[in-house]
Image: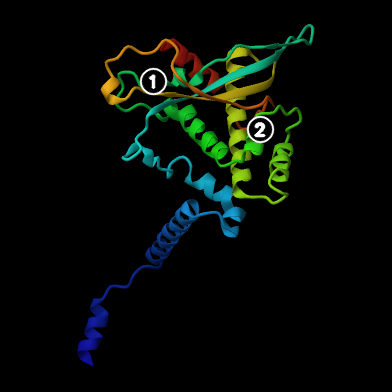
Amino acid sequence: MPNDSREAQSRPDVPPIAKGVAFFLVGVVALHFAATFLWNAPDNPIKDSVGGQVSGYMRPFFQQNWSLFAPNPVNAEDELRVRAQVEDPQTGELRTTDWEDPTRLEWTLITHDPAPSRASRLTSNLHRRVNTAWGALTDEQQDIVATDYQDMSDWRPLADDLIAAQGGETSSRVANMVRADRVATGYATQFAKAIWGEDVVAVQFQLVRTPVPRWHQRFDPPPETPQQTIREFGWRPALVDPDQDEAAFADVLRDLEDNR
């Protein structure tokens, strides 16, 4: 009995705050593993109901591009191209701009820099996100996202058309496509306003994939017209997020243009 008493007295008490921190960390780890499980799990009712929250948590920091490794290493250059419809403030007429390539501007950050910033991968990651969502659609749904939409204040028209094309039942693939389309439209709007001014009323974007030469062809002269895969999405009304900083985005873009 005296020995038990001495052992109890020699054992230090754990402060309540330490216990609280430990329980909090265990909870965070458990939630992370649960989100990772749902992210990698096949479509199911639970994933469909919380897909938006899981996607927002996993991207961009916890998403892995396993195609970096064998057997299917990255073998193409992925680019996002943008053009816009700009309204003449005097006449109200619309003009359509040429296609611009923000991805190639971002690539200027990679040259001679072994550790470039995340800004060098924004549109490449966006290309992958949109392309993955597009690839999960049926042929009919792919035709739908290639059509133009005029009224997209909440992106509901696109979602309704995609849902109708699969029999009226919603799914994670529709949710993923609508979110990806909206994000790409928001980025395209920021880019267009930085390039062509405040009178941008609509934007359109393309996904362009150019195969890179195989290792045994690395010394061959590049072809004059490389084989490309181009996926063109329809026109979307300009989308401006109230929290975005257009001036800061334009400043970064000007710096990228100076790097050319």
The residue nearer to you, when weighing 217 against 136, is 217
Sequence-wise first label, 1 or 2: 1
Residue in view at x 73 percent, y 49 percent: 168
Residue 32, horizontal then vertical, whole percent: 44, 55
Q: Which quadrant of the view contains residue 259?
A: top left
Residue 153, horizontal then vertical, whole percent: 73, 34
The residue nearer to you, when weighing 230 against 54, is 230
Residue 109: give its label: 1
Residue in view at x 30 percent, y 14 percent: 220
Q: Are marks 1 and 2 in contact (CB under 8 Å)?
A: no
Local packing at callout 2 (Cα closer than 10 Å; few below 14, some 14-19, many 20+) is some
Q: Is residue 86 visible?
A: yes
Residue in view at x 40 percent, y 68 percent: 16
Q: Is residue 246 visible?
A: no
Secondary structure under the numbered disc 2 in the rendered image: helix
Residue 12, horizontal then vertical, whole percent: 28, 73
The residue mark sitting in front, 1 or 2, is: 2
Residue in view at x 37 percent, y 29 percent: 75
The residue nearer to you, when weighing 129 against 260, is 129
Q: Which quadrant of the view contains residue 151?
A: top right
Q: Of the residues shown, which amino acid type is indicated by label 1?
A: Leu
Residue 24: give its label: none
Residue sitting farthest toward the bottom: 1
Residue sitting farthest toward the top: 90
Where is 224 relative to 28, above or below?
above
Where is 150 relative to 96, above or below?
below
